Image (cartoon, grey):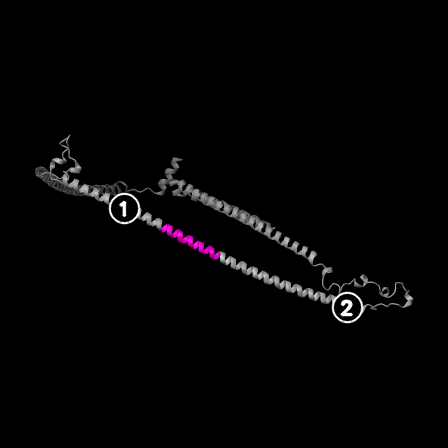
């Protein structure tokens, strides 16, 4: 019972805490002046969302490319593994076929020595001296008896000699084949080295020819470019000389003021031909400047006089204001003194009247009997 009550209290406390947290979040959201007045920067949020989407798209494309490359690598690995398995299977099949064809048990050199069916394949013992079959009681042959031992030994020696000669021949033939294979490999290596040397020599000669051709082409191009630059410099020098001569002989460098005047409008001046003002123009401008300077000086003097008058008027106004304030203070002091004397007189009169009331009019004080009789009569 206690545990159930405790669990219920815990759930209620958790629910209350959750409601309290939600209320705090709501209050923070409502009382946040920045969000309530300024609002949220939607453009910045959209930019962040766009950047995140672009980043996610780039990551997805990268993962897709990586997955595609992994699939390609897996396909290549599977193809290589399948090719390796096929090659291993073919090699095992060839080895098995070679063993079945060339390495049979019956084709062994020493098979006749340890052949388990040799006794059953040979003729019975009694057939070596008689064609009749003696009975078991004739005691003509016994288990383990070898009547053809000498013949068998001679045949085994001959077989051994034949096998030995055959082994020697095979060893000699293998040595000859090995020497021949070594010679062929040496010849092939020498031929490959010679071919490589020849190819290297050809490549070196081709490279040298290419470098020579490139050098000749560069020289020809440099010569053409040098000729072009020389022609360009000559043309530029001619143009510069012609420009210098034209500038020297034209009215551009002369001091003729008539050059700067426009033909259709004499009052206008050509900026690119203007050489400056004439002394008369400079004198007129200086005279006009002097007139403007005198006018400016007179204007400044008038402004200075006006400022002086304004200052004097301001000072006089301030003095009058000070005098008025002083008079106001004196009047206030006189009024305060008169008001004080009037209040004192009123206080004295009120005190005299109160003394008169207390000493003359209110001399008889009512007693308790008076109040009792008054109450009885009122009933």
Picture coordinates of residue 61 (x, y %)?
A: 48, 45
> How many residues crowd around disc 2 within 10 Å: few (fewer than 14), some, or many (20 or more)?
few
Does the magenta-highlighted stretch encompass residue 178? no
Q: Which residues are magenta?
A: 196-215
Relative image position of residue 228 (x, y in whole percent): 28, 45
Magenta segment, prevailing SS (helix, strand or loop): helix
Q: CA distance from mark 1 to mark 2?
A: 108 Å
Comparing 136 with 256, the one in front is: 136
Q: Which mark is residue 214?
A: none
Q: Can you identify the residue that label 1 sits on? A: 229
Query: For this view, does 176 lie left or right of residue 349?
Result: right
Identify the residue position indicated by label 2 in the image: 154
Observer-nearest of 351 and 266: 266
Mark 1 lies on a secondary structure that is: helix
Disc 1, disc 2: CB below 8 Å?
no
Dot 1 alpha-carbon crowd within 10 angstroms: few under 14, some 14 to 19, many 20 or more? few
Quadrant location of residue 167?
Answer: bottom right
Residue 153, given in percent of the width and then of the height, sits at 77, 69
Q: Is residue 5 above or below residue 247?
A: below
Name which of mark 1 and mark 2 comes first in the sequence.
2
- Which dot, 1 or 2, sits closer to the camera? 2
Q: Residue at x 37, y 39 (%)?
A: 373
Circle count: 2
Side of 349 where 169 appears, left or right: right
In the image, 336: left or right of 370?
left
Along the line of sight, which residue is nearer the eye, 125 or 114? 125
Mark 2 secondary-structure assignment: helix
Q: Nearer the viewer, residue 189 or 63?
A: 189
* Position of residue 147 measured from the top left corner of the image (x, y, whole percent): 83, 68
């Amino acid at each position: 019972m206690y545990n159930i009550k405790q669990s219920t209290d815990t759930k209620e406390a958790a629910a209350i805490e959750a409601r309290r947290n939600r209320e705090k979040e709501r209050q923070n959201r409502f009382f946040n002046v920045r969000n309530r007045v300024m609002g949220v920067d939607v453009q910045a949020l959209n930019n962040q969302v766009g950047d995140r989407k672009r980043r996610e798209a780039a990551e997805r494309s990268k993962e897709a490319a990586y997955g595609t490359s992994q699939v390609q690598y897996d396909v290549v690995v599977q193809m290589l593994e399948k090719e390796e398995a096929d090659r291993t299977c073919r090699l095992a099949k060839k080895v098995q076929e070679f063993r079945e064809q060339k390495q049979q048990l019956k084709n062994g050199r020493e098979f006749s020595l340890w052949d388990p069916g040799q006794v059953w394949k040979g003729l019975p013992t009694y057939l070596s001296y008689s064609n009749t079959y003696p009975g078991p009681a004739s005691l003509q042959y016994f288990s383990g008896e070898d009547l053809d031992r000498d013949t068998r030994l001679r045949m085994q020696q001959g077989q051994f000699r034949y096998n030995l000669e055959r082994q020697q021949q095979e060893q000699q033939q293998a040595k000859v084949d090995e020497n021949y294979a070594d010679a062929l490999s040496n010849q092939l290596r020498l031929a490959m080295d010679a071919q490589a040397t020849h190819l290297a020599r050809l490549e070196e000669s081709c490279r040298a020819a290419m470098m020579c051709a490139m050098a000749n082409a560069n020289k020809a191009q440099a010569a053409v470019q040098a000729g072009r630059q020389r022609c360009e410099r000559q043309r530029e020098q001619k143009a510069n000389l012609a420009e210098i001569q034209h500038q020297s002989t034209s009215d551009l460098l002369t001091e003729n003021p008539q050059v700067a005047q426009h033909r259709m409008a004499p009052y206008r001046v050509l900026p690119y031909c203007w050489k400056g003002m004439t002394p008369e123009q400079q004198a007129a401008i200086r005279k006009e400047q002097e007139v403007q300077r005198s006018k400016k000086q007179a204007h400044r003097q008038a402004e200075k006089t006006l400022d002086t008058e304004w200052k004097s008027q301001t000072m006089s106004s301030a003095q009058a204001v000070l005098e008025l304030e002083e008079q106001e203070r004196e009047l206030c002091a006189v009024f305060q003194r008169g008001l004080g004397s009037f209040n004192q007189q009123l206080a004295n009169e009120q005190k005299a009247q109160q003394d008169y009331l207390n000493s003359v009019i209110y001399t008889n004080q009512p007693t308790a009997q008076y109040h009792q009789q008054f109450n009885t009569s009122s009933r």
